[in-house]
Amino acid sequence: MKLWPLFSILLLSQQQDLLGQTAEALIQKGNAALDDKLWEIAELRFREALADRSLTPELKSQATIRLAEAMIHEGNPTEALELLDLSVAAHDPEAPFWKAQALTGQHHFNEAIRLFSKILENPAAPHRTEAGLTQTSLQLALGKPAAALETLSGLIPESSPSTAARIQIYQVEIYLDLGRIKDARLVMPAVDSVASRDRPLAAFLEAQLQLREGHPEVAASAFQSLINQSVTDQSNGLSLIHLHMAAIGLADAIEAQGDPEAAAKSLLDFIQDHPDSPVLESMFSRILQWIPDKPAATDPILERIAQWIPPSTLRPVSGIPGATGTTVVSAWPTYPEVREQRNLVAFSLYTRAMGLHRIGTPEAAAESRRLLNRLRIENPGYFLSNRALYQLARWSLDEGSQDLAFSTLETLRQIAQMPALKGQSAFLEARVAYTNGDLSKATQLFAEAGKFLTGEDAASAKLHEAIARIRNGDSSGTAIVRPEGDPPDAGLEANLELERALSATPAPAARTALDEFLTKHSDHPRAAEARLAAAEAALASPTPDLSFASAQLDAIAAAPEKSAGLPAARIALARLRILDLSKDSAGTITAAQSILDTYPNQPEAAEAAFTLGRTLFKAGNYNPARLALEKLASADTDADRAQAAWLLAARSAALGGTEASKKEALILFDKAIESGGPVTAIASLEKARHLIDMSRPVDAAEFLKAWISKLPETDPLQLPAGLLLGEALFAQGSSNPSSLAEALAAYDKLLSHATGSPALRNRLQYLRGKTFEQMPDDKDPTKTREKQAFQAYHSVLETTTAPAEWEYFERSGFRALEMLEKAERWQAAINVAKKIASFKGPRAEEAASRANEIHLKQQVWED
């Protein structure tokens, strides 16, 4: 059997939504998605457009190029290149540019540069400036700053004044990175030539230049002005990263004026207002540098940092009291897995520990170790945790604990992810080995350090390696009618009227007829019988009239001589129903039990038993409820009531609390199902639900598959059963990944039920999205199908009318928004948030707020 590609299945599952859309409309949707930076949606729409065989060659070429563009943005350059090589796109003027971009995505930088260079030779080439800027970035990545500067210079002559100024700004950044301050000053553009959108960045670079040129007072004023402007006029301020770099520049300028404490305070104040800054590492490294070599015990910088360290939540494991140090046992206490402002807390722990250690007292040293161990325990896998471990090893060496230092460093060398930290660990471990006389080990470790370190550190490692070799003499080296014609007879007419009233249906009609009879014949010999029937009809009506029913029963009780022939159990049952409908649980239980005790063999006893069991169930008395209902179900001659009793008994067992009770519930559900009757389907659904809740999704799926296979395709039960099947299959995803594909197939099948039901469609798309998020990607099993998940979530937003339901509509929308935020695709996230808000649903205000928050926090401004 030939398997259809996943994307074909995806298209089929959404064809109901896209039916009737023209290729031109789909291309327009794709272009709109590109503008909104929704690459996955753009790809989907362009693929759908290309599936239209009536597409003109021109539109086909356009759609292919735009599809390739979307795929490049998505990080799929290989397939993009295959598209661009097709004859329909190969001769498009834009093709070379996107081919070069695709090669860049494949990290074939040199090939990309060759293509970009050809584009730059043609002044009329599309995207020429972008080609030059991308080529510049590639050249910088290849360590060729001179070539990058030459590329930028070649763009300037044919550029507009504002574009030329923008390119010059890029040149200034490169020169500053190279430390070529004079060259940076020479190419710095005049302010009046810079476009308004680029002026904040130009002002930032000017401030950097002033600082590097030895004018810290001027630089400090400029940096402060930029920070103030970004706060008061966010629409014309710096980008987020440059704003935070300006805060660092301000601190550097203050320090350059000889006041490191004020410089540190400047950064601390900024961090207080921006605890999630993306450049905390640079900020805290400066703060640590500016802490005195011998700080006081109450150093103001250290005390300020201490305010960001929350109380410890560590709870030592019982049986290991007093575990300390860097041993495995010391890392055993439990810790919270999620902490707000994790980065701020981690940097604060590390910086305060390092500063306290400088004090030099035993108390400060012990506190330093405690803070670094806490950092490691609360942040496993975090880069600062490994740095803390390295620092603890160094302190152990300084204290003469070489064995502890050596074992710590060996562990760190195996787990560290940062090359520099690997190199530092290897170097320090090599020192230990060298000191211990293990010259072969030292030689090996110094050589390893040299591979990971750079600059002077690498040179030092290689020098030590050579020394160790010489010393060792060795150079070796990761769901009745009335009868007509009879003479009038008042008694007979009254009796006939009563019989008609007693036989009237439904209940409201019977109650009205009986009430009319009693109004005309209150002294009729059978009035008590009429009153009881009227009470029962009032209680059985859609809107029970408890007062009327009670009044009828009270009238019966007030004239016992007239009601002697009435069944007492029936009257008691009517009283029971009033209590039940009054929600008097205690009274209902007492009355029901009284009927069972007094009239155990009467037909009313079964109804009382069912009411008793149901009331006990509602009151949460599950075990007594189950006993009463099982007893009833086993003996009741009313098959429908017996089935209902089995079902309610199963529910009681399921909620009974014990594992044995939950297992027994399955037997009771089966009895309800096997009984056959009006609640068979409900019992089947509840059994499946219970299996899932018992964490037995495999059994639930097997049961549902067998049941669904017997249902007609048009049976409405296909929907709830299919939803449960999808849930059961989804729940197996972690242990049986193939079940996720089955879950997706179940949801795709249900999409046929969504025709004309937007609410159901939204729910299914949400569930499909959740499933895709767990499914491994065919091309890279280490990743999940987030793209398809995003397409499913976003599909609910592709409408111009308000949804029929809000829950899954907004769930899907917000999940799509969260995925964009996680990927730091800020402009796309803003666009989606605004789209959600535009429908004015229950969470519209939240969505609008999110859009504004991202806009301000990330300083995202559209070109």
Image (cartoon, helix red, strand yellow):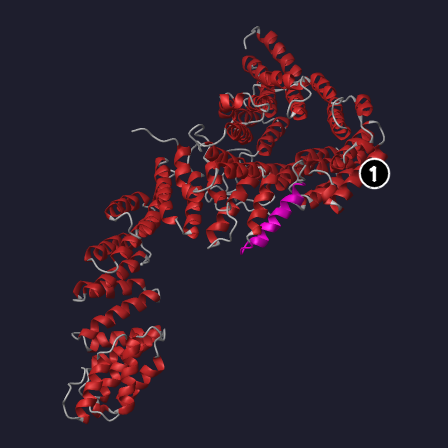
- From which residue to which does the magenta span run? 840-859
In the displayed structure, does residue 536 sit left or right of residue 367? Answer: left
Residue in front for this viewpoint, 585 or 187: 187
Query: Within the image, what quadrant is residue 349 found in?
Result: top right
What secondary structure predominates along the stretch shown in magenta? helix
Q: Judge by depth and name the residue closer to the eye, 400 or 394.
A: 394
From where the camera sits, is residue 306 visible?
yes
Residue 337 seen in the current view = no
Q: Residue furthest left?
A: 486
Q: Is residue 500 above or below residue 627?
A: below
Helix, strand, or loop for circle 1? Answer: helix
Residue 569: where, in percent of width, then height? 21, 79
Q: Is residue 766 magenta?
A: no
Read off the residue under disc 1: 221
As shown in the figure, which amino acid type bears the numbered disc 1? Ser
Q: Position of residue 856 (x, y in %)?
A: 67, 45
Relative to 256, is 769 above or below?
below
Quarter placement of the N terminus? top left
For disc 1, the neighbor class at 10 Å (few under 14, some 14 to 19, many from 20) is some
Residue 13 position by quadrant: top left
Nearer to the camera, 131 or 730: 131
Q: Residue at x 51, y 39 (%)?
A: 25
Quarter of the image that includes the C terminus: top right
Numbered disc total: 1
| Residue 709 percent location from the top left of the image | 25, 45
Give whichever of 498, 110 is nearer the camera: 498
x then y, percent, for residue 285: 69, 33
